[in-house]
Amino acid sequence: MNKIILVIKREYLSRVQKKSFIVMTILGPILMAALFIVPVYLSQMSDETKQIDILDETGWFINKFENSDRFRFDYVVDDLETAKTNMTAKKGYALLYIPRPTASVPSTAVIYSEKQASIDLKSYIKNVMAKEVENQKLGAEILKEIRKVNPEYKSPGNDSLSRESLISEEILKNIKTNISLTSIQMGEEGKEEKSFTEVSMGVGMFAGILIYFFIFLFGSQVMRGVIEEKTSRIVEVIVSSVKPFQLMMGKIVGVALVGLTQFMLWVVLTLAIVTVAQTFMPDTVKKTETTEAFSPGMRIPADAGAVVAAEETESPDGMGRIVEALGSINYGIMIFSFIFYFLGGYLLYGAMFAAIGAAVDNETDTQQFMMPVTIPLILSIVMAQFVINNPEGPISFWFSMIPFTSPIIMMVRIPFGVPYWELALSMAILTISFVAAVWLSARIYRTGILMYGKKVSWGEMWKWLFYKG
Amino acid sequence: MSYYFSAHNITKRYANHTALSNVSIDVPKQCIFGLLGPNGAGKTSLIRIINQITGPDEGELFFDNEKLAPNHVERIGYLPEERGLYKKMKVGEQALYLAQLKGLSRNDALKKLKYWFEKFEIQTWWNKKVEELSKGMQQKVQFIVTIIHEPSLLIFDEPFSGFDPINVNLLKEEILKLRENGATILFSTHNMGSVEELCDNIALINNSHKILEGSVKEIKKTYKTNTFALEYNNFRGSLKTILPSGFELLDQQDEDDITKASIRIPEGTSQNELLSVLIPHITFHSFTEVIPTMNDIFIETVNAAVNNSVTTQNNRS
């Protein structure tokens, strides 16, 4: 046990001291932060005020949108086609159409614009709508609760019963509102192209791609490490002191820790950069933009920022705490699952990569073995597109159960909400799979690392599984 | 007699061939034991089994009167034939890591490494990366790493390959010193010169079978052919004319003013008889018994084994 820790320590330290690690650690967050800041900043460059017409069939949002330097909101009362024509005629920026809800509360809206509507506009609209709907729902729920106590109660004015004491977990769940905002670009020929931009989609896709990237990056690091030990022939010295299994596990765990370290550093550094950017451009990069940011790691503090804002502006009554509660539940799962699926997926693939590394003599020989291993990974990324459009469908379900694809597909699904039993089942399957993969790989590994100068075939590797000690 | 290390009836099979069949060796304490054999005979397989890198299919191993167990690796030092170190790692860091893997504490390892680095005068290498060192320098580092935990059993696979003559000598001296200090040493080699110089006992493995084992002295005695070499002058012509019957002249060559010859005397006669016959006729410059070199014995035994297996195969078919 003591020896495996020594191996882990060496694998970890030798990697985090590498120049490439340090460069990646610094460049990653800069690129990520740039991804959030630059588009926002660029959209601020044109300082003209954008004219937005609002056609609100619900009447819920009259005067809820506030004019600012960047946006001017006008309320129109027309039918949709006339409103569209009018907007084009007066060269307005966009038309926001909030249709009469089919169900009880409004939850959808459509933006018609000639150019793709900007992210900050969309996020502003969604925020305002969600807040308003949630407020309304909360009011209704509270009224319901109070009526339980006092059926005669009429007005929601000041009362001895504070709002906070009535707000239960259940209410919080009930009032949580997702506004789906569709943006339709009106082409020059009057063609309407749909483009979906939902935060959940962004978050899910981003998390899926990040997992994919991490598994690939660190899985192949394991493989290269094994090949390095094999070609430099040090492996024979080491396995005369530790068991091959200890060496393999030490390497896999050491590299996993490197991955986690890199991830944490990215989160921290990205936050730092965004915060700095906010202080230097307080007006341009608002908190709402960071809420729109895709990284799951980013979301907590961004929401915490929103909490502070909420508390300052409109929450003498504990709204801040509600938002905070909402934030922590959701993103707690998100972060936990991210770490779990990163580790689980990485262990599964890392073990296979280690076996491949042990079977070959140099990196060019890895191709034939890499193919079958990477196909499920690539397939997951391809399937992610379908999953994102139908996160509850059978394809989504099965691909989030199959351990080879579940790390990516499940991460894509989680922002849309996944039942706990599905999550638990998927995690259990993944756990069993990586234990099996590690066990099988260890058998190939201990034979492979001592074989030199031999072209290995799949049949050969199959035989290795049954060699004795 | 109890041995420090024994392997009993070791058999190891791979998918397509048998690497070792029923091989036993016994290594006495504080002995330098040579494991000889042509390439592919199974030496490295046996060495890996002794190091518990792989396990035997059949057979048992004993170390210091105990059954060989995983915790024994800390008392065994191993220098493999294919040597290597992490190229990107610093020499000192690496030596420290490998020493700790052998069970030394960090402080102990540091102290001992310091001693050896000073002894080999390589302190300046401590912070260099391995890839900056020459091959010979890397071998030195590797040797230190092998013996740093003061193992009581040392296993060297082809220890002299890749060293220049000066370093070979240094290494030989160290091996002898290690033995003096109580270590038992097992090494495989092709270099028969070093076998004669160093080994007390040997085992010869060919084609997965052990075909010869014993102390070097005994083996040489067995392979002695009662042949003597002499140098003389003042006699021209064949010695045959003066040799009594039973004495066989194997070779005779005239060189400038000296003649060299080799003569085999019959079983049971003493070399004094030969001398007494020759002294009246010739002036001696030298007279020595021809003792077979390990090289001769090696070639002879291996060839005999090959012929044997050929004949048995022929008989079978």
Image (cartoon, coloured by chain):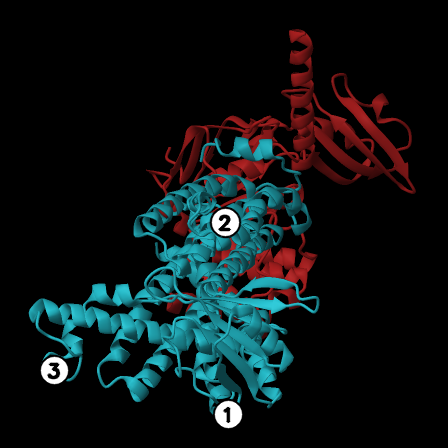
User: Which quadrant holds residue B109?
Assistant: bottom left
> Mark 2: which amino acid?
Tyr
Query: Where is mark 1, residue-wise?
Result: A280
Residue hosting label 3: A159
Which color has been applied to chain A in this rendered view? cyan
User: Where's residue A191, x and y in %?
Assistant: 66, 63
Residue type, label 1? Phe
Q: Chain of mark 1?
A: A
Q: Secondary structure at mark 1?
A: helix
Classify B262 as above or below B134: above
Return the disc, 3 or 1, that comes first in the chain's sequence.
3
Pinpoint residue A161: horizontal percent, then vertical percent. 11, 78
Task: Give the residue type that dot 3 points to.
Answer: Asp
Tell me, yes or no, whether dots 2 and 3 are on the same chain. yes
Q: What shade has chain B been given?
A: red
Q: Earlier in the sequence, mark 1 or mark 2?
A: 1
Residue at 43% across, 28% down: B59
| Mark 2 closeness class: few <14, some 14–19, many ≥20 residues within 10 Å | many
